[in-house]
Amino acid sequence: MKKSRDPFSRLKRAVGGLFDRATGYVRGVGRQADEVLKSDPIDFSAPSIPYYENLAARIGFARVVLYMALLVFVVVTMVSNHRLITYENLYYLAKDIGAASQTAKAQADSLSYPISAEGADFALYRGGLVISGSDEVTAMSASGRQTLSVNVAYADPCARASDKYCITFGRGERSFSVYNAFVQVHTETTDYPVFDAVVGDNGNFAIVTRSRDYKSEVILYDDNMEKQAVYHLGGYVTGISMNEAGDRLGIVSVEAQNGVWETKITVIRIGNRIGQSSTTVMGVVGGTCGFVADERFAVMFTDRLMVVNSDATVTGEMLFDDTVPTLATISRGSVAILFESGNDLTKSVLTVYDKNARELYSVTLDGDHPITKAGKPSALSVSDRALFLRAGDSLFCLSGNGRQLSSTTISHDTLAILPEGDDEVMVCTPAYAYRLEVEDFTRIN
């Protein structure tokens, strides 16, 4: 019988033989120890002790075997991944380790960056910040050091980020780019305009575009920038989100059927095999969405809040009575919604729900409330233990289930308020950003 010429098979047999031999030596050491323990006590005054000499020899042999196994592992890894071992990749790896280490250092209270256009978009990234402006993409580390600066030309700049990558694109333009903390790692020109994108901590990401035959197309990529799947939708995508782990993708699409609005919720499970499930809600329009847990996907409608699991089965639902949602934010573990009363336009209600769409607490904002007096609420964000609401040039912080209210003054040209950590928020202006903690706010009640 002809022997296999596969070098990896021969290498596997050789490594297996060495392992079996080393295992035999280890078992021999155990048997020898049992025999010694049963015999007379060891004479430690003797010039040499055969037991320990033999044991040292066996340990030395095991060490050689481990070194050989390590060498074989390194060789096999290099051979199987030789295309990825380049000077550029090694350089990027070293740089990326240095950039990632910045997150372990003390965070700077403020980050200064090149002045961005009014329409700049911001995303938290590795403890720092990514700024996608109309003519430049900038990344700042947690310590305030600028690590990336790339010239772009975006009419409507957008930024999305996770622990691994950040993605920038111009909404309605036919390209997108993927970055790590210091360099562009991928860029792609699409056949049709890009409307949105999401990215997970494992590097999986998705792009929302359209195709010749469908109103919406969602392209799913893995962490090597290779396409995993393409999903065609008959309606327009109004919301898309990926959980932190990057193994669940939620899509909300809307279309009109015979004059009736139809919202389709699709949840995609990403793994060795990719699966998807969907559910349809008739007569309403869905939009804002997000994962409140790894397996729970929340969707805001004009008349309700709905939570589905990975199989698109409804696990929680809350209908809105005589109220109109004006602001909403979905975070891990909770959903915050600001409602206007349908009967009294001078009164609004701020309500926070848990991951099952059950109400946690509610705060009524009437004409005498400090938030209402400050101006019309325009931005809402939630951290793990606090809720932040902007009204005019004031930023309000609600903690203790809404019982504690405090505020601070912010710049009138503030562009974004991004929740960070348990009780922190990043306030972004066109030229700089700064962190605020709950302790930085002045207590009102």
Image (tube, rainbow, N blue to C red):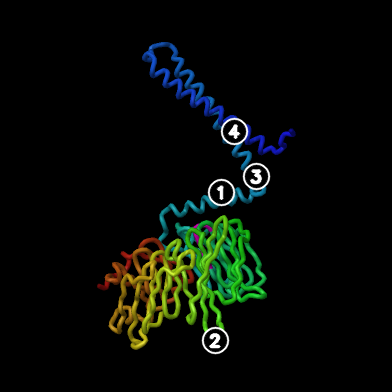
Mark sitting earlier along the chain (3/1) = 3
> Which residue is at 41% across, 77% downward?
304
Q: Which residue is mark 3?
A: 80
What distance separates the C-alpha of mark 1 from that of mark 4?
Answer: 34 Å
Which residue has dot 4 on it? 16
Q: Secondary structure at mark 1?
A: helix
Q: Which residues are magenta?
A: 159-164
Residue under the image location 46 percent in, 15 percent down: 50
- The residue closer to the viewer here, 431 or 66, is 66
Tell me where residue 189 appears, x and y as whole percent: 66, 67
- How far from the left and from the top, in percent, is residue 291? 45, 66
Front disc: 2 or 1: 2
Looking at the image, residue 346 lies above or below residue 210 = below
Whether 329 is among the magenta residues is no
Lower sequence index among marks 3 and 4: 4
The amino acid type of the residue labelled 1 equals Ala
Residues under labels 3 and 4: Cα distance? 19 Å
Q: Are marks 3 and 4 in contact (CB under 8 Å)?
A: no
- Residue linked to disc 1: 94
